Image: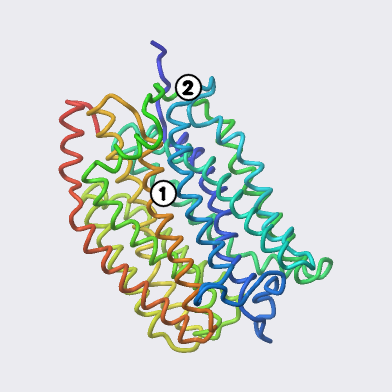
Amino acid sequence: MKQLKPITNKLLWVFALGQFGWSLLSGVVSNWMVYYYTGTPTEQNPNTGIFATGITQNPILFKLTLFGLILAVGRIFDAVTDPLIAGWSDRSKFKGGRRIPFMRAMAVPFSLCTIGLFTIPQTSNIALNNTTLFILLMVFYLFMTMFCTPYNALIAELGDTQQHRINVSTYISLTFIVGQTISFFLPNLAGMLEGPFGNAGGIRMAVAIMSAIACVAMLFPAFYINERDYIESKPSETRPFHSLAKTFSNEQFRRFVYSDVIYFFALTLFQTGLAFYETKLMEIEDSYTIVLTGTMTFISLCLYPLVNKFAKTFGKKRLIITGFFAYSCVFLITTLCGKGLVWGFVVAVTASIPMAILGILPQACVADVAELTRLQTGEDRSGMFFAARTFAFKMGQAIAMVVFTSVTVSGTPQSYRSTALIAFITCFIGACIFLTFNEKKILSEIKELKGSEEI
């Protein structure tokens, strides 16, 4: 049997660069597509809805807009492909491993598709633009799944001990937050490029630059890490949807997923509306978005060492519940907010606490459940556990996209305020559900099955 190399924190940091890359691409699309493709420009924020004239804006079914339906269908398509890609990855027998070959193949097309979303659907034919946007978004989500699903499976496989699982979750949460934060620089970077390229051209060039940076970040761990040197992976024999059914048959995993779906529904409502909350409710210029996001991110990052330490001392469950209730407070503050930059800072500072907690710990919970299942059954289906989680929370995101674009179709301040209220109610419910998750039972069973080994 080949002697495996020890997994080190340096290796986990290199691995975390991949998270920075895909989170930057995801942030560009999730944070700015709705902003640039819907809404109306104002004197203060002239780029709001700059691409809106290229696609259908009026509701086409009840209060459902075409753009909202496209986004929702995209997330559903993304969710459905997750178990298929996870099953393919779990069963693969590539020479380079079960996960890394996917990452190497997908980084470039994933990045190019992101550029295309802000560039190609801009002809004079609205029907053609609608169709092109729909196809590009489906391809974007497919490429993202083909990179992220194998990547996420490595969280459990490189997290060979409880210490490593919490560490790798911390590192990828850090790089995820950095990627998302940099995506908020898009209007600022676009503003710097408006001179030679114009408003729309500046936005497209900014997207291209960020996509190139993201591509390099995704390729680095894909070629630096030799999967076979660190992981003794045995291909799974279970077919994708049978594996998905077995995954959801795990009682503790179901309890986790129920709360996770609701949490991501609430968070997606909030994230999608963040630029609107700041510009429509608080009446802040969109150029201040990066200042507020930077404040939130800086405070959150300062809390990372504490979250890492407290999770090992007090357990992940207590902190996650705290994060749920903290986000509920953030959503309630947004619902009640008034005008002025001070409200933006209140939301940013308050959100930094749950942002740190829920950015790190949930994936460590999934890794724990996947590790316990591997020890109990002898079959490593880590890819499917993470895909099942993403399958579930993306359904929540899809519903959130439909709800947001439907509730805000009038574009009134009250409509945006209503989405924050919905986020508050649902996040509070998610916190109550997570109280049923039994972390102690999972960790004690892992320890028992591993005997004297470190967990």
- Near-viewer residue (420 or 295): 420
| Relative horizontal placement of residue 404, taking residue 427 as reference (left or right) | right
The percent coordinates of residue 276 (x first, y second) are: 53, 77
Rendering quarter of residue 445:
top left
Q: Residue furthest bottom?
A: 339
The percent coordinates of residue 389 (x first, y second) are: 37, 48
According to the picture, the residue beneath numbered tag 1 turns out to be 390
The percent coordinates of residue 96 (x first, y second) are: 54, 23
According to the picture, the residue beneath numbered tag 2 turns out to be 228
Q: Residues within 10 Å of mark 2 (few under 14, many from 20)?
A: some
- Callout 1 amino acid: Thr
Q: Residue furthest right?
A: 196
**Are discs 1 and 2 less than 8 Å apart at CB?**
no
Residue 39 higher or lower than 237, as above or below = below
Which quarter of the rendering shows the C terminus? Answer: top left
Residue 420 higher or lower than 257, as above or below = below
Q: CA distance from mark 1 to mark 2?
A: 26 Å
Q: Number of numbered discs present? A: 2
Asked which colour scheme the image uses, the reply is rainbow
| Relative horizontal placement of residue 178, taking residue 129 as reference (left or right) | left
Residue at the image position 63 percent from the left and 75 percent from the top = 57
Label 2: state its secondary structure. Answer: helix
Of the residues tagged 1 and 2, which is closer to the observer? 1
Rendering quarter of residue 440:
top left
The percent coordinates of residue 198 (x first, y second) are: 80, 70
- Near-viewer residue (22 or 181): 22
- Callout 2 amino acid: Arg
Q: Disc 1 or 2, which lies upstream in sequence? A: 2
Residue 76 higher or lower than 124, as above or below = above
Label 1: state its secondary structure. Answer: helix
Residue 211 higher or lower than 99, as above or below = below
| Relative horizontal placement of residue 132, taking residue 28 as reference (left or right) | right
